[in-house]
Structures are given as C-alpha cells and as structure tokens.
Amino acid sequence: MFTTFRKRYLSKIISGTLLFYAFSGISSLLNYAFYPIIGRVVSVGEYGEIQFLISMFTQLAVGFVVLNIIAIIISVRSKTATEQSESVQTLNRVALYIMTPVVVISTIILFFMHSALDLREPVAVIGLGLAVLVSVPYTTSVGKLQGNGQFFESGIVGVVGALGKLLCSLGLVLLGLGVTGAILGVGVGTFIAYLLSLLLDNNKSRLSLIPNLFIKKHRLQQIAHVRSQSVVAIFVMASLTILSVFDTVISRITLTHTDAGQYAAVATASKIILAATMPLMWLALPHATRGQSKDTRKYLMLTSLLTIVFCASMLIFSGPVVRLLTGIDASSYLRFSFAASIAMSLCAIAFLLGAIMISRGYLKIVTISTLIGLLAGAVSFFVAISLSPVGAAILAQAVCSLFIITGGIISIKRDLR
C-alpha cells in the first residue's frame, strides 16, 4: 500500500509541486539578489536608473506572461506531441512578429525621452530592447515545459536564467559598462536559459537556436482556438503588469534622481510577493485549464496565505528588509512600504485569478472587471494625487486589483454551481 501511495501520489507531489516551488524560490532569491548585489557596485542614481529600466523591461515584456499562459493552454489541449510542438512553434513566431515592432517603437521612444526621464546612459535602452526580444522564445519554451508537466525541468531553467542574469550583469558592470552592462546582462542570461530549455524539452521536434519566422496558414489554424483567450490575456496581463510598476514609474517622473532611487528600494521590497506567488500561478493553470477546480482553489488559498504573512512581515520589518535587499537607506520613504506591500499582495492575487478566469474561459467577467478596475484606479489616482503622487499610485494599484479579484470570486462561484 505504501509503495502504491509513494508511486502515485508522493512522487507526483514532489516532482510536480514541491521541487518546482523550491526551484522557483531559488530563482526568486537569485532575481532579488540582483538588486542588493548590483546596488552595492553602482551609485544610488545609477541604481534608480537600473530599477526603472527593469520596470520598463516588465512593461515591454507584458506579453511574456500571456505567452506563458497560452503556451500552457495549448500544451494541455494538444492531442499529440507533434501537434503540440507545431502549435507552440507557431505561437512563438506570431509572438515575435507582434513583439518586434512594439520593442523597436518603444526603444526609440525611450531613447529620445532619456533626458526627460533623467537617464544618464541612453544606450542601455537598446540593451533593454534586445533583452525583451530574447525573452520571447524563452517564454514559450518554458510554457511548453510547464504544460507538459515538466515542472522540474522548468524550475532548473528558471534557476539557470536567474543566476545567468545576475552573473552576466555583475560582470559587465564590473567591466565598467555601468547601467548598460546591467541591462545587457539580463538579455545574455535569458538567452542561456533559453538554450537550456530547448535541451530539456521532452517533446522537442528539433533543436533550433534561432526560431524559424516563416508561418504557414494551416499552422495558424492550429492555434485559432486560443485567439479570444490570447486577446483577453494580453489586455488583462498588460493592465496588471503596468499596474504592478505604476508606483515606480510615477516616482521616476515626480521625484528627484536620488529620491527616485530611494523609493525604488522600497518598491523592490514590496514586489517580493509577486515573485513568491507567481510559481503558484503556473502550477494552478494546468489544473484550471482541465477544469480541476478543487486543485485550483488550493493554490488560491496558498497564495492568499502568503500575502497575509508577507504584509504582516513588512509591517514589522520593512526597514531591515529594504536594507537587506538593496543596501540602500530609504528611511525617507519607508512610510510607503506597508501600503505598497498591501497593493502588491492584492496585485498578486489578481494575477492568479485573472489567469484562472482566462484559462477557464470566463473572458467577459475578467474583461469587465479589469475595465472597471482600471477606471476606478484612475479616478482614485487623480483624487489622491494632490496629497502624494506616489501614495496615489499605490492606492490606484490596490483599487484596480480589488475589482479584478471580485471578478475572480464571481467566476469561482460559477464553477461551484
């Protein structure tokens, strides 16, 4: 009996959940180690620039979360390994066609706006664009691994990617490339992880370092069933991604170069919860796509528990946490740390529920709740902006997230009927 339990359940839990979450935790630790390590080898002003550009990376990379979600859905629904590989490859090519002009236009805009944004190294913006493009095939590869249940391999890829980004960025900064080197290192580390994801894929059709950009019409038909989900996912995840860095962008616009760097340290600490809960979203999505509501709710409950523990910790230990993560004395802005932590915790739950609603096909609910949330967030921001622009941005993050969470609760109740 014990042997049966071990084979059927214990091994599945260890390989599919615990190990993946452990690797994800290591990846998150390495990703956050990027900030205190880089923060100690650059000036406060340069750190602010790096944090801002990383935030822009998140903005430009909004499609990555969408790609990951859609790649998981395609992988789960594909009937054969061949169909799966062809569909994911087509998704990758379509994504490159969409992201390339977006990246080029965004890079040009940021480059010419570098003076207004007080960016001392405009060349770093070009490195940012390259890092985004490299992340497109990387994301579809990882999504395929997760859709196949290869969470162990996905976890290894995440660790290698995080470590590669840290070491490459640190090395380039120490070589004297400054902010530009830090951003280029992110792209190099991501490319290394992409190569590894290709090697570990059990259902790979062929090893290709550079994706084929030619798309056949019948290949497009293979992914037509996720067209509506893709469009809604882009809107919802774009909204949440922009929302998650809204406070950082506002601080960059309204504060001085040094003050923006200090608030960036507070923002870095508040966003720990996003890194901690994102692995739970990837674990929940295959279950949600298959309609396994009971398993999906378990991950939602665990995410909610983590946010409560995180907010309580930040209420008590915000100062030491910010200094540990960044090495920066941000005492002037610690008053925002608890509120920012609550806002990011709500955003983390909104990410999970938004992804679940998309995978379950509740597209109207998630679209309407996101639209109302954005409108309510904008109103709250402009009402409170006279008191504190940064505080108003944090309030907007919390308000918008609450509306998306409300939509998620409605969809869960429908599943229980």
Image (cartoon, rainbow, N blue to C red):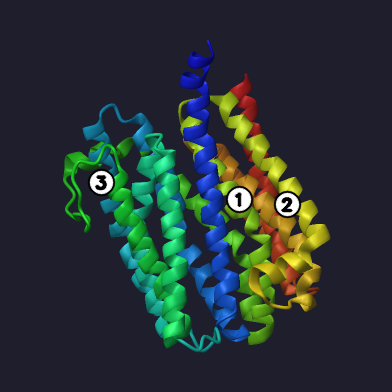
In the rendered image, which residue does mark 2 sit on?
Answer: 310
x and y percent of residue 128 in the render?
41, 73
Which of the two discs, 1 and 3, sits closer to the camera?
A: 1
Q: Identify the residue shown where x is 72% and y is 62%.
A: 340
Tag 1–tag 2 contact (CB < 8 Å):
yes
Q: Is residue 416 above or below residue 213?
A: above
Q: Amino acid at mark 1?
A: Ala
State which tag comes first along the sequence, 1 or 2.
Answer: 1
* Pointer 3 local density, CA inside 10 Å: few below 14, some 14–19, many at least 20: many
Q: Give me the C-alpha separation between circle 3 and circle 2.
A: 38 Å
Disc on res. 123: none
Q: Identify the residue shown where x is 59% and y is 24%.
A: 294
Q: Identify the residue shown where x is 65% and y is 33%.
A: 410
Disc on res. 276: 1
User: In this image, 201 relative to 115: left or right?
Assistant: left
Q: Is residue 324 above or below residue 23?
A: below
State which tag comes first along the sequence, 1 or 3.
Answer: 3
x and y percent of residue 57 in the render?
47, 67
